[in-house]
Amino acid sequence: MNDTLRTEKQKMLAGELYLAKDAELDAESKRALRLLRLYNQTTETEQDKRTQLLEALFDAVGEKPQIVPPFHCDYGSHITVGDRFYMNYGGVILDCNKVHIGNDVLCAPYVQIYAAYHPTDPTVRLTGRELAAPIRIGNNVWIGGGAIICPGVTIGDNTTIGAGSVVTKDIPANVVAVGNPCRVLRSVETSASG
């Protein structure tokens, strides 16, 4: 398709250079900011209202989501969370591309999930164009406090990411991974329940 016929949003979701100041993306960002303001003003007794707001904000929401305010994201509409997703306060998801989070994922305070990034070429960066790459987090993943998940990363099922880690590359299933850059420390045994 001719590049001039594609929207900035289409370019963004394709992982290509795009302009975030585009009218369509600006309108979607403002929609998200309105919903986030309402969400972040809720109290601990308003879980049903919080769930309704997350259902309006996100692309898809599983059963019993819990995000402790304050929470921030870019658009919300590119985020999918599975059942029993939990994110403690101070969470950030920059969803300039698809962010898929599985079932039973737990995030400690100040976890940052960044699908967005900027060109390293300073000349290109000065044009205002940005980039984004999808992130996938499997089922039953624990992400420790202050961890940063970088663009394009996949984290496998049953994995633990240590506090303060910076995840720049894919992390397989069934491991404990820590550090900056995050590296596999050891495998974990999974026990069948029942």
Image (cartoon, grey):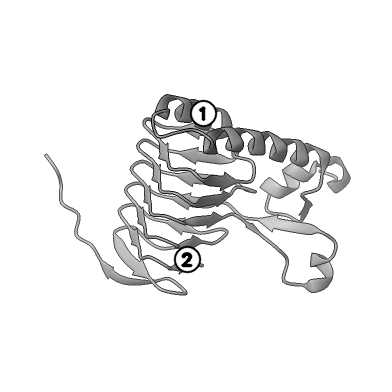
What residue sits right under mark 2 in the picture? 167
Q: How many marks?
A: 2
Residue 48, image quadrant: top left
Q: Residue at x 81, y 48 (%)?
A: 21
Taking the image as shown, residue 140 lies to the left or right of residue 15, namely: left
Q: On the image, numbered disc 1 is attached to which residue?
A: 55
Q: Name the foreground residue: 62 vs 144.
A: 144
The residues bearing labels 2 and 1 have C-alpha atoms spaced at a distance of 28 Å
Q: Which mark is residue 123?
A: none
Left/right of residue 70 with respect to residue 117 in the rendered view? left
Point 36% across, 65% down: residue: 162
- Kindly identify the residue that appears in the image at 70 percent across and 57 percent down: 131
- Precedes in sequence: disc 2 or disc 1: 1
Q: Quadrant of residue 126?
A: bottom right
The percent coordinates of residue 163 (x first, y second) are 38, 65
**Residue 98 visible in the picture:** no
Residue placed farthest to the right in the image? 4
Residue type, mark 1 in image = Glu
Q: Residue at x 47, y 30 (%)?
A: 50
Mark 2 neighbour density, 10 Å: few (under 14) some (14–19) many (20 or more): many
The quarter of the image holding the C terminus is: top left
Q: Amino acid at mark 2?
A: Val
Query: How busy is the neighbourhood of tag 1: few (under 14 within 10 Å), some, or many (20 plus)?
Result: some
Where is residue 178 shown, x and y percent of the image?
37, 70
Element carrying mark 1: helix
Element type at marker 2? Answer: strand
Q: Where does the image place residue 16, in percent across and percent down from the top left?
A: 73, 54
In the rendered image, the vertical position of residue 163 relative to residue 80, given as above or below: below
Task: Using the rendered image of the protein, determine whether residue 76 is visible from the camera's viewpoint.
Answer: yes
The spot of residue 1 in percent (x, y) is 81, 43
